[in-house]
Image (cartoon, coloured by chain):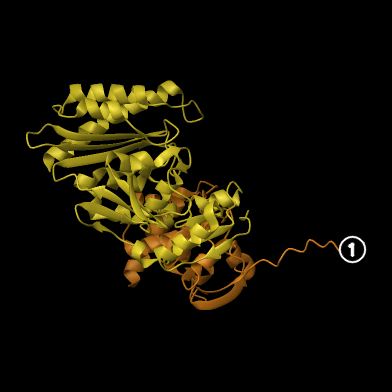
Amino acid sequence: MYPGRFEYFVPESVGEAVSLLAERGDEAKVLAGGQSLIPLMKLRFASPAALVDINRIKSLQGLGQADGHLRIGALVRHKECERSELLRGRYGVLGAAAPQISDPLVRNLGTVCGSVAHADPQGDWGSALIAANARVVAEGPSGSREIPVSELFVGPFTTTLEPNEVVTEVRVPDPGARAGGTYLKLERKVGDFATVAVGVQVELDGSGKIGRAGIALTGVGGSNLRATRAEQALAAAEPGDAAFAEAARLAAEDADPIADHRGSVEYKRNLVRVFVERGLRAASDSAAAA
Amino acid sequence: MSETTMSAAPPATRQVTVTVNGEARAAEIEPRLLLVHFLRQTLGLTGTHVGCDTTSCGACTVLLDGVPVKSCTVLAVQADGREVTTVEGLAAGGTLHPIQTAFHEQHGLQCGYCTPGMMLTSVALLAENPDPSEEDVRWAISGQICRCTGYQNIVKAVRSAAAAMREGS
């Protein structure tokens, strides 16, 4: 199998990439890691007339702490996240998600930003980043804007990004030292999509109560889902089994799974409950130990 | 009859130079050409196999700047100016690479279809981790499928190569 014909461009700056996209509208696609796009093009599910390969734009590299947030540049591969010491502790939800994405070879090429822009409802980064309250930075002809990841997804493979915008980075706000997180995923085998996965982040306030809890669900809806009611139930709560069980119950109720070869609706809903409860316990313990 | 030829313009091509197994190889290719087809068809290096062709099995694994990737899911134009190592590049001057010797001695292959990819991933692993545990090896090759299910001996071979390379170095 091979893709249909396309024009190929290798811009050296974001500005150049944006101009190329602006000229071609939705006929063009951005190529970063290519680990979702190229398979889709080979199957002819996608046949863009032009590819804008951003891999040579140096300003898009880099995973590091910036002004009050963690910056994940558009060329940061899953592998870099998997290995980064930065993605432990307070950014633990990201560090836990990274090694569970696809398989080691795909992680060598695939990117965080590409994965988010692709908006696969079963993508792992979407949930990990929603739990961490992250924002996407998109650059277009009229400048750059920030979009909360939770507001990026419209539905399966559909985002609020414009065709002439390039995702340049993801920004993850620093949750402070007393924060922890984890990502729990059930997959049938390495490389499979999640049957169900859950991203959890817990931030404790000065008195040891929960300041903010971030919870997002993978594989149980048309996009990564924020478990809003569960998060609200935990705000200002005393961390502990009772609060976690109630939040898990609410998250399971708000999940919207479909029955497929990976499991029944009831099974997936129950997995959400179990993972949210376990995740909250682990995240809270990690936050308290920090 | 008037001429009604619908002759489409010839496909646009692009000049690339890829260093394959240490040798610069230049070619004029279509951007949609996949790296695996560039290696097998343009360059005639058929040691890289096409397995599933859907980014699942890892039979087509090669090293791109030393990093294992599935060459069915990389465009050849993306390798322009970069280094690719295929199984043909492992042996040096007729002497097998230690990973090849180990796969031979430990029966790390049955049908051999996954073997080039398995060996290349192993070479990358050993460059970073000269003494991998069984779990390290299984983790490293977890994106690759041996349809003969010969994983026990593949893992044995990789660890045996590691030991040989540690002694040799």
**Corner quadrant of residue A227:** top left
Across and down, in percent, residue B67 comes to 41, 63
Whether A85 is drawn above or below A92: the answer is below
| Crowd band around label 1 with a 10 angstrom C-alpha radius: few (<14), some (14–19), many (20+) | few
Whether A201 is drawn above or below A33: the answer is above
Across and down, in percent, residue A238 comes to 13, 27
**Corner quadrant of residue A126:** top left
Q: Check the image and name the residue furthest to the left.
A: A207
* Left/right of residue B97 with respect to residue B46 in the rendered view: left
Q: Which residue is located at x 38 percent, y 52 percent?
A: A113
Question: Can you identify the residue that label 1 sits on?
Answer: B2
Q: Which residue is located at x 51 percent, y 51 percent?
A: A37
Across and down, in percent, residue B109 comes to 52, 55
Please tell me whether mark 1 sits on a helix, a strand or a loop.
Answer: loop
Callout 1 amino acid: Ser
Q: Look at the image and tell me whether residue B61 can be seen.
A: no
Q: Colour of chain B?
A: orange
* Left/right of residue A258 with respect to residue A4 in the rendered view: left
